[in-house]
Amino acid sequence: MKLATLRNGTPDGALIVVSSDASRAMAIGSIAPTLQAALDDWSRIAPALRECAAQVDAGAGVPLEAHMLAAPLPRAWQWLDGSAFDAHGRLMARLFGIQAKQSDRPLMYQGLSHQFVGPSDDVPLPRERDQIDFEGEFAVVTDAVPMGVSPAVAATHIRLVMLVNDWSLRALARDEMMTGFGWVQAKPACSAAPFAVTPDALATGWARERVQMRLRVEVNGAPFGEPHGGEMSVGFADLIAHAAATRSLCAGTIIGSGTVSNENYAITGSTCIAERRAIETLDSGAPRTPYLRFGDRVRMSAVDDAGNSPFGAIDQRLAKAHIPSQDDPAEAAR
Amino acid sequence: MKLATLRNGTPDGALIVVSSDASRAMAIGSIAPTLQAALDDWSRIAPALRECAAQVDAGAGVPLEAHMLAAPLPRAWQWLDGSAFDAHGRLMARLFGIQAKQSDRPLMYQGLSHQFVGPSDDVPLPRERDQIDFEGEFAVVTDAVPMGVSPAVAATHIRLVMLVNDWSLRALARDEMMTGFGWVQAKPACSAAPFAVTPDALATGWARERVQMRLRVEVNGAPFGEPHGGEMSVGFADLIAHAAATRSLCAGTIIGSGTVSNENYAITGSTCIAERRAIETLDSGAPRTPYLRFGDRVRMSAVDDAGNSPFGAIDQRLAKAHIPSQDDPAEAAR
């Protein structure tokens, strides 16, 4: 089952059920007005959504207006992002001159969740000199998860799978990391691909609580990387259990994989610039790939073995944010 | 103006206006059903709320049922917690054997915001051996803040002031801090005092974007500390500007001061056990004060120069969380 959110002028948009081939959609407001509402009562609502999915696959509904799609959850109560691709962690540690992960505990930080940028929206950021970068990630959405859940039970709480671009400002990241407090300024709002998909609908693209697909990144139309999601050192069940060790997770919690990265990065490429620059530095003494400029386009999609792209694409342009005049409260309050 | 949230079986509760002396309350669902709704449209709604506040101060409304109060925002889209009391930072750095803050940039992390525990609710946590501690903090609630706001303009977005207990699990905190990713397991849900108060209503208790009151902590009925909130090295306007450097803040964002702590800690005491243990270690070579046990009570209130306690009190009992059986999915899903 494939779900999406249609813009309707409200913060959470309207939940729609989308056909498997993403050509058609059905409004299902009478069942659940928003994806958050569906997740709040998933066990009861999901069967009705699945009936709609069967109908829309059989030709019901209307043609999908892709340009009207927001992120599946335009805002979420919680975004906890792991770093479960060890290849990335090792490369970044070498770039930053810090120690790589020192234990078997998953790495995870809590990030901005009150906004997920829609898949074709411009991404407004303040300054190119902040070293604007992307991070291609897979993510899962849970229903309510009790505190102290085991990985085995955590797996049963994975309701939807998503594709996320975790925008990162590298010039700010290292200093924030060194404080030990994690990232605030270095991690603005993420973007999300349009379709949130149930694990069963991913077929062979989902196994061992990992997305078994390549995450394909293109920058300004040129291929950048397409590492495989199967190489997570810990799967999403372990990440959820880690997140829920001392807290219950609310329905609609989004758990990220961290930047998708493979050991054979020389062949697969990377899903973020910082990692490619680390590789360039290791290979030839200096980075060659620049960070992004305003106007650059970043496209991300996931591709399974059959060539399907179940999450749709994030395809966005980087834009200069409007920063209010510092001296004019009226301007700032707009 | 003093606002609070009454439990009504919904996640966000019902907004009420409370008399200055906290004896009476008025339901104002026709103006704004929830505090989040009021903050979403503050400029338009606040004047009507102020009219209700005048009426309830004049005897309208009903007696306040304090036991029915939830946290002012039982859940929030964003909780960004600073660490603006340098005395605390220096002591904790010595305890942890790490470097104290290395720049003039405020310290801040993003924390769990999908739940704020009500002021008299039990606090469920999984294990005493996690070294359960409290942190007494002041916090402000903003309306929508644009990206890149200056501190001067940020100050105009401070709509409400709160008192928060930022529960902390010290046995987990150091390891998480050393990853650079900030805290997930070490920072479960915070608790909040019942009343969110507009800065003007704090009178001399609010100046220079700081709460000019003592934060009084009692553990099992015994005084623990009462440092003064005025000693923040940066005020809330600076913290908001820091938070909004690369993101816009949604209405209902809560910004914390970090643990209230004073340079003359020998006289004022502390608002967390870890700091007291650091002081004991520095004074006599070893910590004496134990972390909390299940059943312990922690009470926090703020006291102004006239002896008023405008936020009311957090007064809670620590409880052992029900952790589901690891082998029983049905049990875990309860």
Image (cartoon, coloured by chain):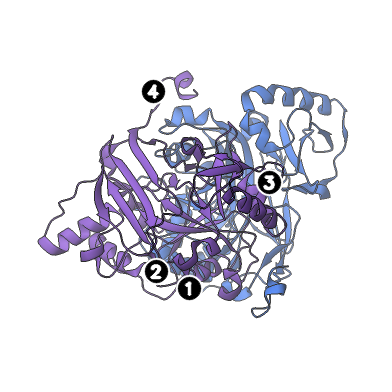
Chain colours: A purple, B blue
Please state which of residues A197 and A282 is positioned toward the viewer in this rendering.
Answer: A197
Q: Amino acid type of disc 1?
A: Arg
> In the image, what residue type sits under mark 3?
Ala
Q: Which residue is mark 3?
A: A32
Give left or right: position of A104 versus B190. left
Q: Which image quadrant is residue A41 in?
A: bottom right
Q: Residue furthest bottom?
A: B327
Residue drawn 75% across the image and 44% down it = B13
Instruction: Say which amino acid is labelled 4.
Output: Ser
Dot 2: chain letter: A
- Spatial CA distance of label 2 from label 4 is 47 Å
Q: Quadrant of residue A46?
A: bottom right
Q: Amino acid at mark 2?
A: Gly
**Circle number at residue A208:** 1
Of the two numbered discs 2 and 3 on the same chain, state the one appearing first in sequence. Answer: 3
- In three-dimensional space, the C-alpha distance between marks 3 and 4, rounded to whole angstroms, equals 42 Å
- State which chain disc 1 sits on: A
Q: CA distance from mark 2 to mark 3?
A: 33 Å
Image coordinates for residue A59, horizontal then vertical, percent: 58, 46
Mark 4 lies on residue: A325
Q: Label 2, on which residue?
A: A230
Q: Position of residue A22 (x, y in %)?
A: 49, 47
Determine if marks 2 and 3 fall on one subunit.
yes
In the rendered image, which quarter contains the N terminus of chain A?
A: bottom right
Q: For the residue carrying disc 2, how many other residues have a C-alpha within 10 Å: few (<14), some (14-19), or many (20+)?
A: many
The crowd level at tag 1 (other Cα within 10 Å; few <14, some 14-19, many 20+) is few
Do discs 2 and 1 share a chain? yes
Q: Secondary structure at mark 1?
A: loop
